[in-house]
Amino acid sequence: MVLCSDFLTAWQQLRGGQINCQQALQLLRDEQGMLTLSLLDDEVCQRFFQLFPEGQELPPVVPLLLWRNCYYLGSPVALTPDLVQSICDRTLTQVKILPITEKSYRCWHHTRHVDLNRIGDAPLVNPLTGNHDAEDISETTELFLSKADDQIERIKTIIASALRNRASDIHLEPTTEGLQIRYRIDGVLRHVTKLPLEVSRRVIVALKVMASMDIADSRRPHDGRIGEEYLSGDGKALGMDMRVSTLPCVCGEKAVVRLLPRKNPFSTVDKLGFSPKVLPTYKTWLEQPQGLIIFTGPTGSGKTSTLYTSLQAIAKEHVNVVTVEDPVEYVLPHITQTQVNEAAGMTFAAGLRAILRQDPDIIMLGEIRDHETAETAVRAALTGHLVFTTLHTNDAVGAIPRLQDIGPDPSLVSDALLGVVAQRLVRRICPHCSEAYTATDTELERLGLLPSQVNENPVLHRGRGCSQCLDSGYLGREAIVELLEVDEPIREIIHSGNIIDLHRYLRETDFMSFRQAAIEKVFAGVTSIDEVFRVLPRSALRVPSPQPQRLPPKLVAQLPD
């Protein structure tokens, strides 16, 4: 990408005698009618539109040149002689109309009406139809960046583009060729553009200034926050927090920006993605006066969204809900939220001890990291508090040995634990380009299904790719949930500490595993088999054997006595 500030406009070159009028028009417009927008001159546009008061009817035209008392205008539509004459009368000049592509006109219109000093997430509108415009992320972002005058405008342009396209994170990665910009959209990174090498460092420095970081220290990682306002689609000014993290790398400093709009993005428990089979069970957990509910999953699996949505559902006037988080990502109404600050001695364990002196009814603990925190959380769940917390495990069953490894007494864990929720986020098939097709035997085998286990000619869905989903075939995300309810047999197994017995028991019961939940989502047309395999670990999709597998004699002989 090349920034327009590095060029003279075609009109400036024409006035300077470097080129003639014909050459200027050739620079501005190719044979197909595509415009080189970076070479258009703002002064020509300003002079032209000053002659037309606000509200006066004007056909879709782009002022290209003003030369020797003649306006050269580009238009994507055919203009009648009367329209052309009315423009001549208004401007007191000659007018020549040159055909341009609709796409060029739309792009020019967007750049003319965008405010690079304001961040907005409103979708672009096609000026010719009034409908939402199908945005090419790379093209539009590069176009707006070419109009930016300084680094702050460039950063705000990148943020606005990310918001319009549902991005959760912005990656700015220095390379030997420039600053690569990528957006994480629906959990997948997408390349957007690359800024020139000469501005790479300046953009990172400007970002660090905005986040109140030390710009003189580029040898250590830094964390900061930016508070900004942005315009929503309905024109309201809303607040947004941005977490900025920088990391030294070979080519400079990499920066990642997490976008956190302050408006409440959470809906209801019913819309979290729980299977209809397990949703009633989960709702009963939320109604319990005490107990421990554990959420597991890797980073970016939607644990925070599920936690916040659940807390909102139970945060009533008559209950005291207190949280300890690292960090506090969203501020929720009617909930007391506390930020971990280890440098000041405010750890999860210290925060939890303090919370217990605040007369809580419901406690949310961001993560269990050590023995003290685990012990306190379990005892809190046994003494009349409903406790929510998270662990990092591959599945719901793995949370139990993980919690035991941290240290609480198994008998306390078995009495306190209500259940475990493990989840992953899969992309939903785009409803605008979804198409049905008949599943093949190979696809069924990937899910561990035999043709005899499904209906004849089973129908699945996939996305073809369209402008609405950025040609990915997916639009939005939904959780695949594995729910482990701790009943009396499981309590006895936890107390005994035999995880093999737990696996055997779950095979014999109607346990909603990741595999079953994924099969349900695939056959409901929510997601695809490829997406399931992209997100879930292979161990979760393995078909469980009815009996424990015997080890080969050679392996048995190698086991220690």
Image (spheres, helix red, strand yellow):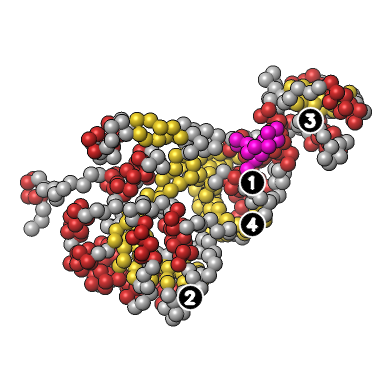
Which dot marks residue 366?
A: none
Find out whether the residues at labels 1 and 3 contact each other: C-beta distance under 8 Å: no
Give the residue at mark 4.
Answer: 238
Image point (23%, 72%), residue name: 411
Amino acid carrying mark 4 in the image: Leu
Mark 1 surroundings within 10 Å by alpha-carbon count, few (fewer than 14), some (14 through 19), many (20 or more): some
Amino acid type of the residue tagged 1 in the rendering: Ala
**Amino acid type, label 2:** His
Q: Secondary structure at mark 1?
A: loop
Task: Please report the residue visible at 22 percent of the width from the left and 66 percent of the height from the top.
Answer: 488
Residue 145 % position (x, y)? 66, 40
- Mark 3 and mark 2 lie on one chain; the one further toward the N terminus is 3
Q: Amino acid at mark 3?
A: Pro
The residue that label 3 is drawn on is: 59
Q: Earlier in the sequence, mark 4 or mark 2?
A: 4
Q: Label 2: how many residues lie within 10 Å, few (<14), some (14-19) or many (20+)?
A: few
Camera-near label (4 vs 2) is 2
Identify whether 458 is placed above or below 394. above
Of marks 1 and 2, the one in the foreground: 2
Q: Which residue is mark 2?
A: 318
Q: CA distance from mark 3 to mark 4?
A: 34 Å
**Where is residue 435 shown, x and y percent of the image?**
44, 32
First of labels 1, 3 by sequence position = 3
Q: Residue at x 44, y 58 (%)?
A: 269
Task: Examine the structure image and report whether residue 132 is included in the region drawn in magenta.
Answer: yes
Nearer the viewer's eye, disc 3 or disc 2?
2
Marks 3 & 4, CB-CB < 8 Å contact: no
Q: Quadrant of residue 243?
A: bottom right
Instruction: Give the extent of the magenta segment.
Output: 122-135
| Residue 404 drawn at (x, y percent) | 26, 66
Q: CA distance from mark 1 to mark 4?
A: 12 Å
